[in-house]
Amino acid sequence: MLINCAAYQDGRKLADIPQTAIRDYVRRPDCFVWVALRDPEVVELEAMREEFGLHELAVEDTHNGHQRPKMEEYGDMLFVVVHLLEIGAAGQVRVGEVDIFVGANYVLSVRNRSNVGFLNVRDRCEREPHLLKFGSGFVLYALMDAAVDRYFPVIDALEQELEQIEDGMFTKENSARDNIEALYALKRKLTIVQHSTTPLLETVHKLFGGRVPQVCVGMHEYYRDIYDHLERIVKHVEALRDMLNTAIQVNLSLISLDDSAITKKFAAYGALFAMPTMVAGIYGMNFEAMPELRWTYGYPLALAAMLGLDVLLWRRFRRAGWI
Amino acid sequence: MLINCAAYQDGRKLADIPQTAIRDYVRRPDCFVWVALRDPEVVELEAMREEFGLHELAVEDTHNGHQRPKMEEYGDMLFVVVHLLEIGAAGQVRVGEVDIFVGANYVLSVRNRSNVGFLNVRDRCEREPHLLKFGSGFVLYALMDAAVDRYFPVIDALEQELEQIEDGMFTKENSARDNIEALYALKRKLTIVQHSTTPLLETVHKLFGGRVPQVCVGMHEYYRDIYDHLERIVKHVEALRDMLNTAIQVNLSLISLDDSAITKKFAAYGALFAMPTMVAGIYGMNFEAMPELRWTYGYPLALAAMLGLDVLLWRRFRRAGWI
Amino acid sequence: MLINCAAYQDGRKLADIPQTAIRDYVRRPDCFVWVALRDPEVVELEAMREEFGLHELAVEDTHNGHQRPKMEEYGDMLFVVVHLLEIGAAGQVRVGEVDIFVGANYVLSVRNRSNVGFLNVRDRCEREPHLLKFGSGFVLYALMDAAVDRYFPVIDALEQELEQIEDGMFTKENSARDNIEALYALKRKLTIVQHSTTPLLETVHKLFGGRVPQVCVGMHEYYRDIYDHLERIVKHVEALRDMLNTAIQVNLSLISLDDSAITKKFAAYGALFAMPTMVAGIYGMNFEAMPELRWTYGYPLALAAMLGLDVLLWRRFRRAGWI
Amino acid sequence: MLINCAAYQDGRKLADIPQTAIRDYVRRPDCFVWVALRDPEVVELEAMREEFGLHELAVEDTHNGHQRPKMEEYGDMLFVVVHLLEIGAAGQVRVGEVDIFVGANYVLSVRNRSNVGFLNVRDRCEREPHLLKFGSGFVLYALMDAAVDRYFPVIDALEQELEQIEDGMFTKENSARDNIEALYALKRKLTIVQHSTTPLLETVHKLFGGRVPQVCVGMHEYYRDIYDHLERIVKHVEALRDMLNTAIQVNLSLISLDDSAITKKFAAYGALFAMPTMVAGIYGMNFEAMPELRWTYGYPLALAAMLGLDVLLWRRFRRAGWI
Amino acid sequence: MLINCAAYQDGRKLADIPQTAIRDYVRRPDCFVWVALRDPEVVELEAMREEFGLHELAVEDTHNGHQRPKMEEYGDMLFVVVHLLEIGAAGQVRVGEVDIFVGANYVLSVRNRSNVGFLNVRDRCEREPHLLKFGSGFVLYALMDAAVDRYFPVIDALEQELEQIEDGMFTKENSARDNIEALYALKRKLTIVQHSTTPLLETVHKLFGGRVPQVCVGMHEYYRDIYDHLERIVKHVEALRDMLNTAIQVNLSLISLDDSAITKKFAAYGALFAMPTMVAGIYGMNFEAMPELRWTYGYPLALAAMLGLDVLLWRRFRRAGWI
């Protein structure tokens, strides 16, 4: 689906143009075209391929989807893949993708499997003509910057999730089984986020360090800024993974500890039953000469003895923290 | 076994040629020969060695088999080893191998221990003369691309396997012992796949990054495309291994947890027996003055007391989640 | 909040100057201005941006805060972010930040979220005119050196914390649950410190190794000295993390061990009850021909037997270390 | 002990020569001498040092033994240390060492602590004069190739050992304690093999990649072939170590699982005893009004009830897999 | 404390000289001074700083102590820090430090917190004038070589310690708790040794690989020899750490195994008590019609039955390895 198609000159929008006019504007050296597609059909992509003269392998990648984040140069054209991350309604991490084709005179962005668009990016760009003057390289920056900025709330959500599990673990609010499942699910999510962000770091680095693609020249500080944000995210994810691994270990320790506590409790209560049973057994013996049996208060005394011994045991177990 | 032997010129097939004619076609600079062998005998390999003038060490490697994926240059000749992965009937990972000798005017592919051939690759190549014009370098690309594309279903199968184990783990459908064995077996498989794919990554990189062998010059985008696919596979395998290690840990936690649950259940049921036993013991004592013993309803009252106390205990254990 | 604003020439302080005079002094090539802000308002930062002509992205970073330690060059200006670490009252690690803008003729330091200032740094600098002559590069060194020196007591506090947990673990003074929580909390703290120090290492390296920013030229030994201190800290943190991981494992072993000990104790005391219960049961049997039942001392003998057997058992368990 | 001492020219053996003649042959530019020592005395080494003008530090290393695999250049002389691995009678890994001194006109190999010699290497070399023509560089290749080829059976033996332990683990044929000890011992062995092979990889790389020592020039493909074999070995050892670590973890899970199974069995059999004991206790009570006690078949009915309840319980436990 | 101060020329000692004469000898180009201090006072260090013109930061490091091993160049002066390791009386690892200042005409070694001196190094140097001719670079080599050689017995002691723990673990000679504490303590020691040796490796590499400091030129083989020894030590320490981590895991498995064994034993002995108790309970029932009760040999038969059943159970447990 075509979302938007406009031509820009000197940092300002010339006009929304029809798809058929793209060819004309792309030829004008002082002008660039910015097209946005969303979940396009094969024919739409094919039309764009012809309009801009895109490389077949890049278009194939866009068509297939599910690429890793990457930047590839096909002659003068840049092909950039960036993941779009959202937290879904059920707490899952949803991975969309924006594939950006950048030439000297055009930017084509193809958004797949994501509900959040880039209209605000276009608005912001149009409000900053002094930056939009940089041309297609700035649009690429603006799109990537917006995508990366949307990673932060995802990371924050995952961090909060870890903290909730931790709280549940130490306060015993949640069952250990729930903690295990939650930790495992979180690990899955962190792995997804890591696979979306880590390769992007290297990708962004190619846009400002070393030999920089022509369209990005002169925007060093801006791409470095994305890199810097991304590095914070990547390190944060690493730290979360590390804490999570520790949490899994710690949870095992807590389970073992609970097991110990139960064994103690079991042993203690067992003794509280075993003691009167033993005493009762003794007075159930059939010896002829057992003077206590004939005492008037033998029975209540025996009961009192049982109770007394149990109270003693109970106190001792209490002090030892077994009960 | 000789599968196929044909000469190509200018992107088009000239003819299927007999083995004895190879020498003539290889000499013609504008023409190349594409030979496919399968599980060849020593003499067949030896014949090819003489026909193409292959290096003795490379032929020895092919004869011995079980090489790691690699690319070696012997003068102008490239020797490339690629693994072929299939999921066997019993779910095991079967590793075959294709050894490819590439010269300016020839491609010799030797397939070992694999049932799936490359005939469709030849067909596709012959349908794309504009690419086949690139010569032997394109055939190498097409063969490697086909081999790498066949890794994807293998990875998917292993991912599904992990997901099934996870499901079984958390739903308690499978026994813990089965989970452990399955996780261990999966680890073995992932190790095999990793050993087939990781070294290939470096190998492919040599075919488009830095100093590129002569026959691959001008095909940069194509080899980079294989690299990109392979990197996705390698990272996917890494992620699976990582999740698997966590799953093994989590499984241990679940076992410990089960152990706790059993201990609790054991303790609870133990108490349900111990309580009436104790009460019965008390009324089994032989004191002369035990008024209850003479009550008409002493016995049923005692039974009721036992039952009542057990019901109380049972409820309490129930509420605590022990039973 | 503006803390301080002074002009220096030839290693000596010229005067405290008002903010409006900054522009004049910065223009004089033989002179530099040193301004210190603390938790500044947006307008204060904006004023400084205009005064010194700072890059928009750097000012934005300072405004947003929570940056990773880094050094960025914007043309001739250096932008350096350094974390400030303190141990809070509750033992937590508090992370503040000082952002330093350095040009040939000025240093602007912006301190955020930290109570400890850099006045003593200014004093020390003013007492060492032969070093302060180096200009803004030396002030940057002095600020970074002071920040890094303050890491040492933080590390020492964390090391002490680990040692206390270890002691508690092996002497059984603390409960295992407390140890686990303490180890987990310590891991969190070490992660925070690691994220403040490790990226700074790379940052400092850029100030004396390879191509050095103009303002730092000639101060190689001094920045290397910071690097050296920082490396010691980073390695120390790594070692602490490593020991901590081992401590978590060891703690699990100790819990398992305790569990064993409890099981043994439980078994032993169980036997001490089970033995007399069994004997009493035997003499509670209703056989007509049980000669012992008629012995005058049958009862005391039976009691003595029970006690004797229990003493025997008790000794044996004692010797085996079960009790 | 001097094993062998011969002079070669143009790929062919001239003669076995006495030690005293070495000096003469070494001076002839078209000729080289190949000497083999085994577990030499200090004086023998000293004699060789003088004969060939070897560097004192290299001779000292040979004398001390227990070097890591390495290649060192002393001027034009190469000093190469390669480990020799064998599986001893008791299954242990025995580490010998061959130290090779290579100059333009000589090869001196010193074998220590190993029973398997290199006579077959000499034989093979003498049968391939077209390769032996390369001179001392080829002899070095042949010796290293032979040493590396002997690693394969060692690795295979260790792999088999791991597989046996795995089988024992999952089939419960071996005791868990035996598995643990075997896994630990295998880890030791793998560590030894790793320390013999990993540094050799880097060593061999120096003989064909980058600046190559003079005597190895022109033998690129041959040394690369050793490298390739060695890399397979190194990766195999890594994989074995990785599987072994997992096996240790899995073994722990299996032990925990066994523990659970025992607890269940214990609980089940405990109940089978506790049930009749409780019933018997009830009918041992001394209430006057217990009608069952007077029934003619009260006793057999009670016994039958006990038995019946136990059978019910037994079936239930059986179904639950506890027994 | 000044230990020694002597001037050397042409590989031979000229004379022991007073501190005040240092200045004169250092000025003579063909001569060098070798001074040794031990745990010096501030004033002694300050005197040396003036005598040799040492850099302030290096002297500060020496004064503060507790540096990581490192090599720093201050102009033409080298500043080298090497740790001195000893095994203390209580088995602890004691870390001393020797700081070496090396100029073209002088060597100043400052030993801190270590009892073992370098007098024998001086003696050996003076006995080898052909090497001492190299000047201060050779003295640096000799000091470092001596320090590194003293690491070997430390590593050997730690290896022996690990082996003793292993033996204790598998033979059950030591208690599991002792093993855990010993493993943890050993980990601490290995961490200390690693922090003393690993950074030194890099340090030594700078003295013979790449751009070498002037005073070390021409001594390539000698420094490489130290590097080689050090690499062996570093790899050995790594291997010990790796084995130790495995040992900790294995120990946990052994503890779990012991726990299983105890549970089995407990269950078995429990049954041996529960069986007669149950039988006795049955014959304690008060049914009127229990013919056995009236048999003359009822009682001894019952006892025999109890005993017989217990023997049967005992045998069965014995066979199952539970007892």
Image: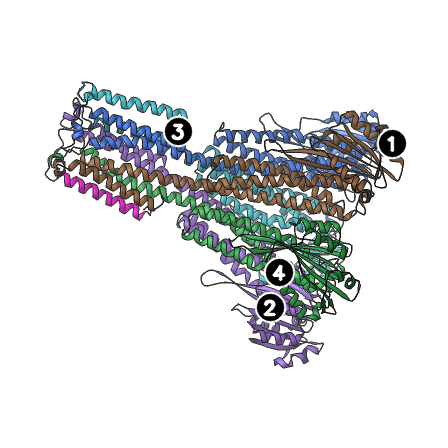
Chain colours: A brown, B blue, C green, D cyan, E purple
Labels 1 and 3 positioned on one and the same chain:
no
Q: Position of residue E207 (x, y in %)?
A: 67, 62
The Cα–Cα distance between marks 4 and 3, rounded to whole angstroms, is 68 Å
Residue under label 2 = E62
User: The disc labelled 3 sits on which kind of residue?
Assistant: Trp
Disc on res. D322: 3
Looking at the picture, tell me which residue is in the foreground, A171 or B286: A171
**Occupied quadrant, residue E274:** top left
The Cα–Cα distance between marks 1 and 3, rounded to whole angstroms, is 76 Å
The Cα–Cα distance between marks 2 and 4, rounded to whole angstroms, is 29 Å
Looking at the picture, tell me which residue is in the foreground, D211 or D319: D319
Residue B54 seen by the camera: no
Residue at the image position 23 percent from the left and 37 percent from the top: A278
Disc on res. A23: 1
Q: Is residue A243 left or right of residue E131?
A: left
Q: Position of residue C164 (x, y in %)?
A: 46, 55
Q: Chain of mark 3?
A: D
Residue under label 4 = C117
Q: Which residues are magenta?
A: C295-323
Q: Quadrant of the N terminus of chain C?
A: bottom right
- Give the crowd class for mark 1: few <14, some 14-19, many >=20 residues within 10 Å: some
Q: Chain of mark 1?
A: A
Task: Tell me if label 1 and label 4 are in contact, CB under 8 Å.
Answer: no
**Residue C319 counted in the magenta span:** yes
User: The disc labelled 4 sits on which kind of residue?
Assistant: Gly
Point out the frontmost of discs 1 and 4: 4
**Occupied quadrant, residue E89:** bottom left
SS for callout 4: loop
SS for callout 2: helix
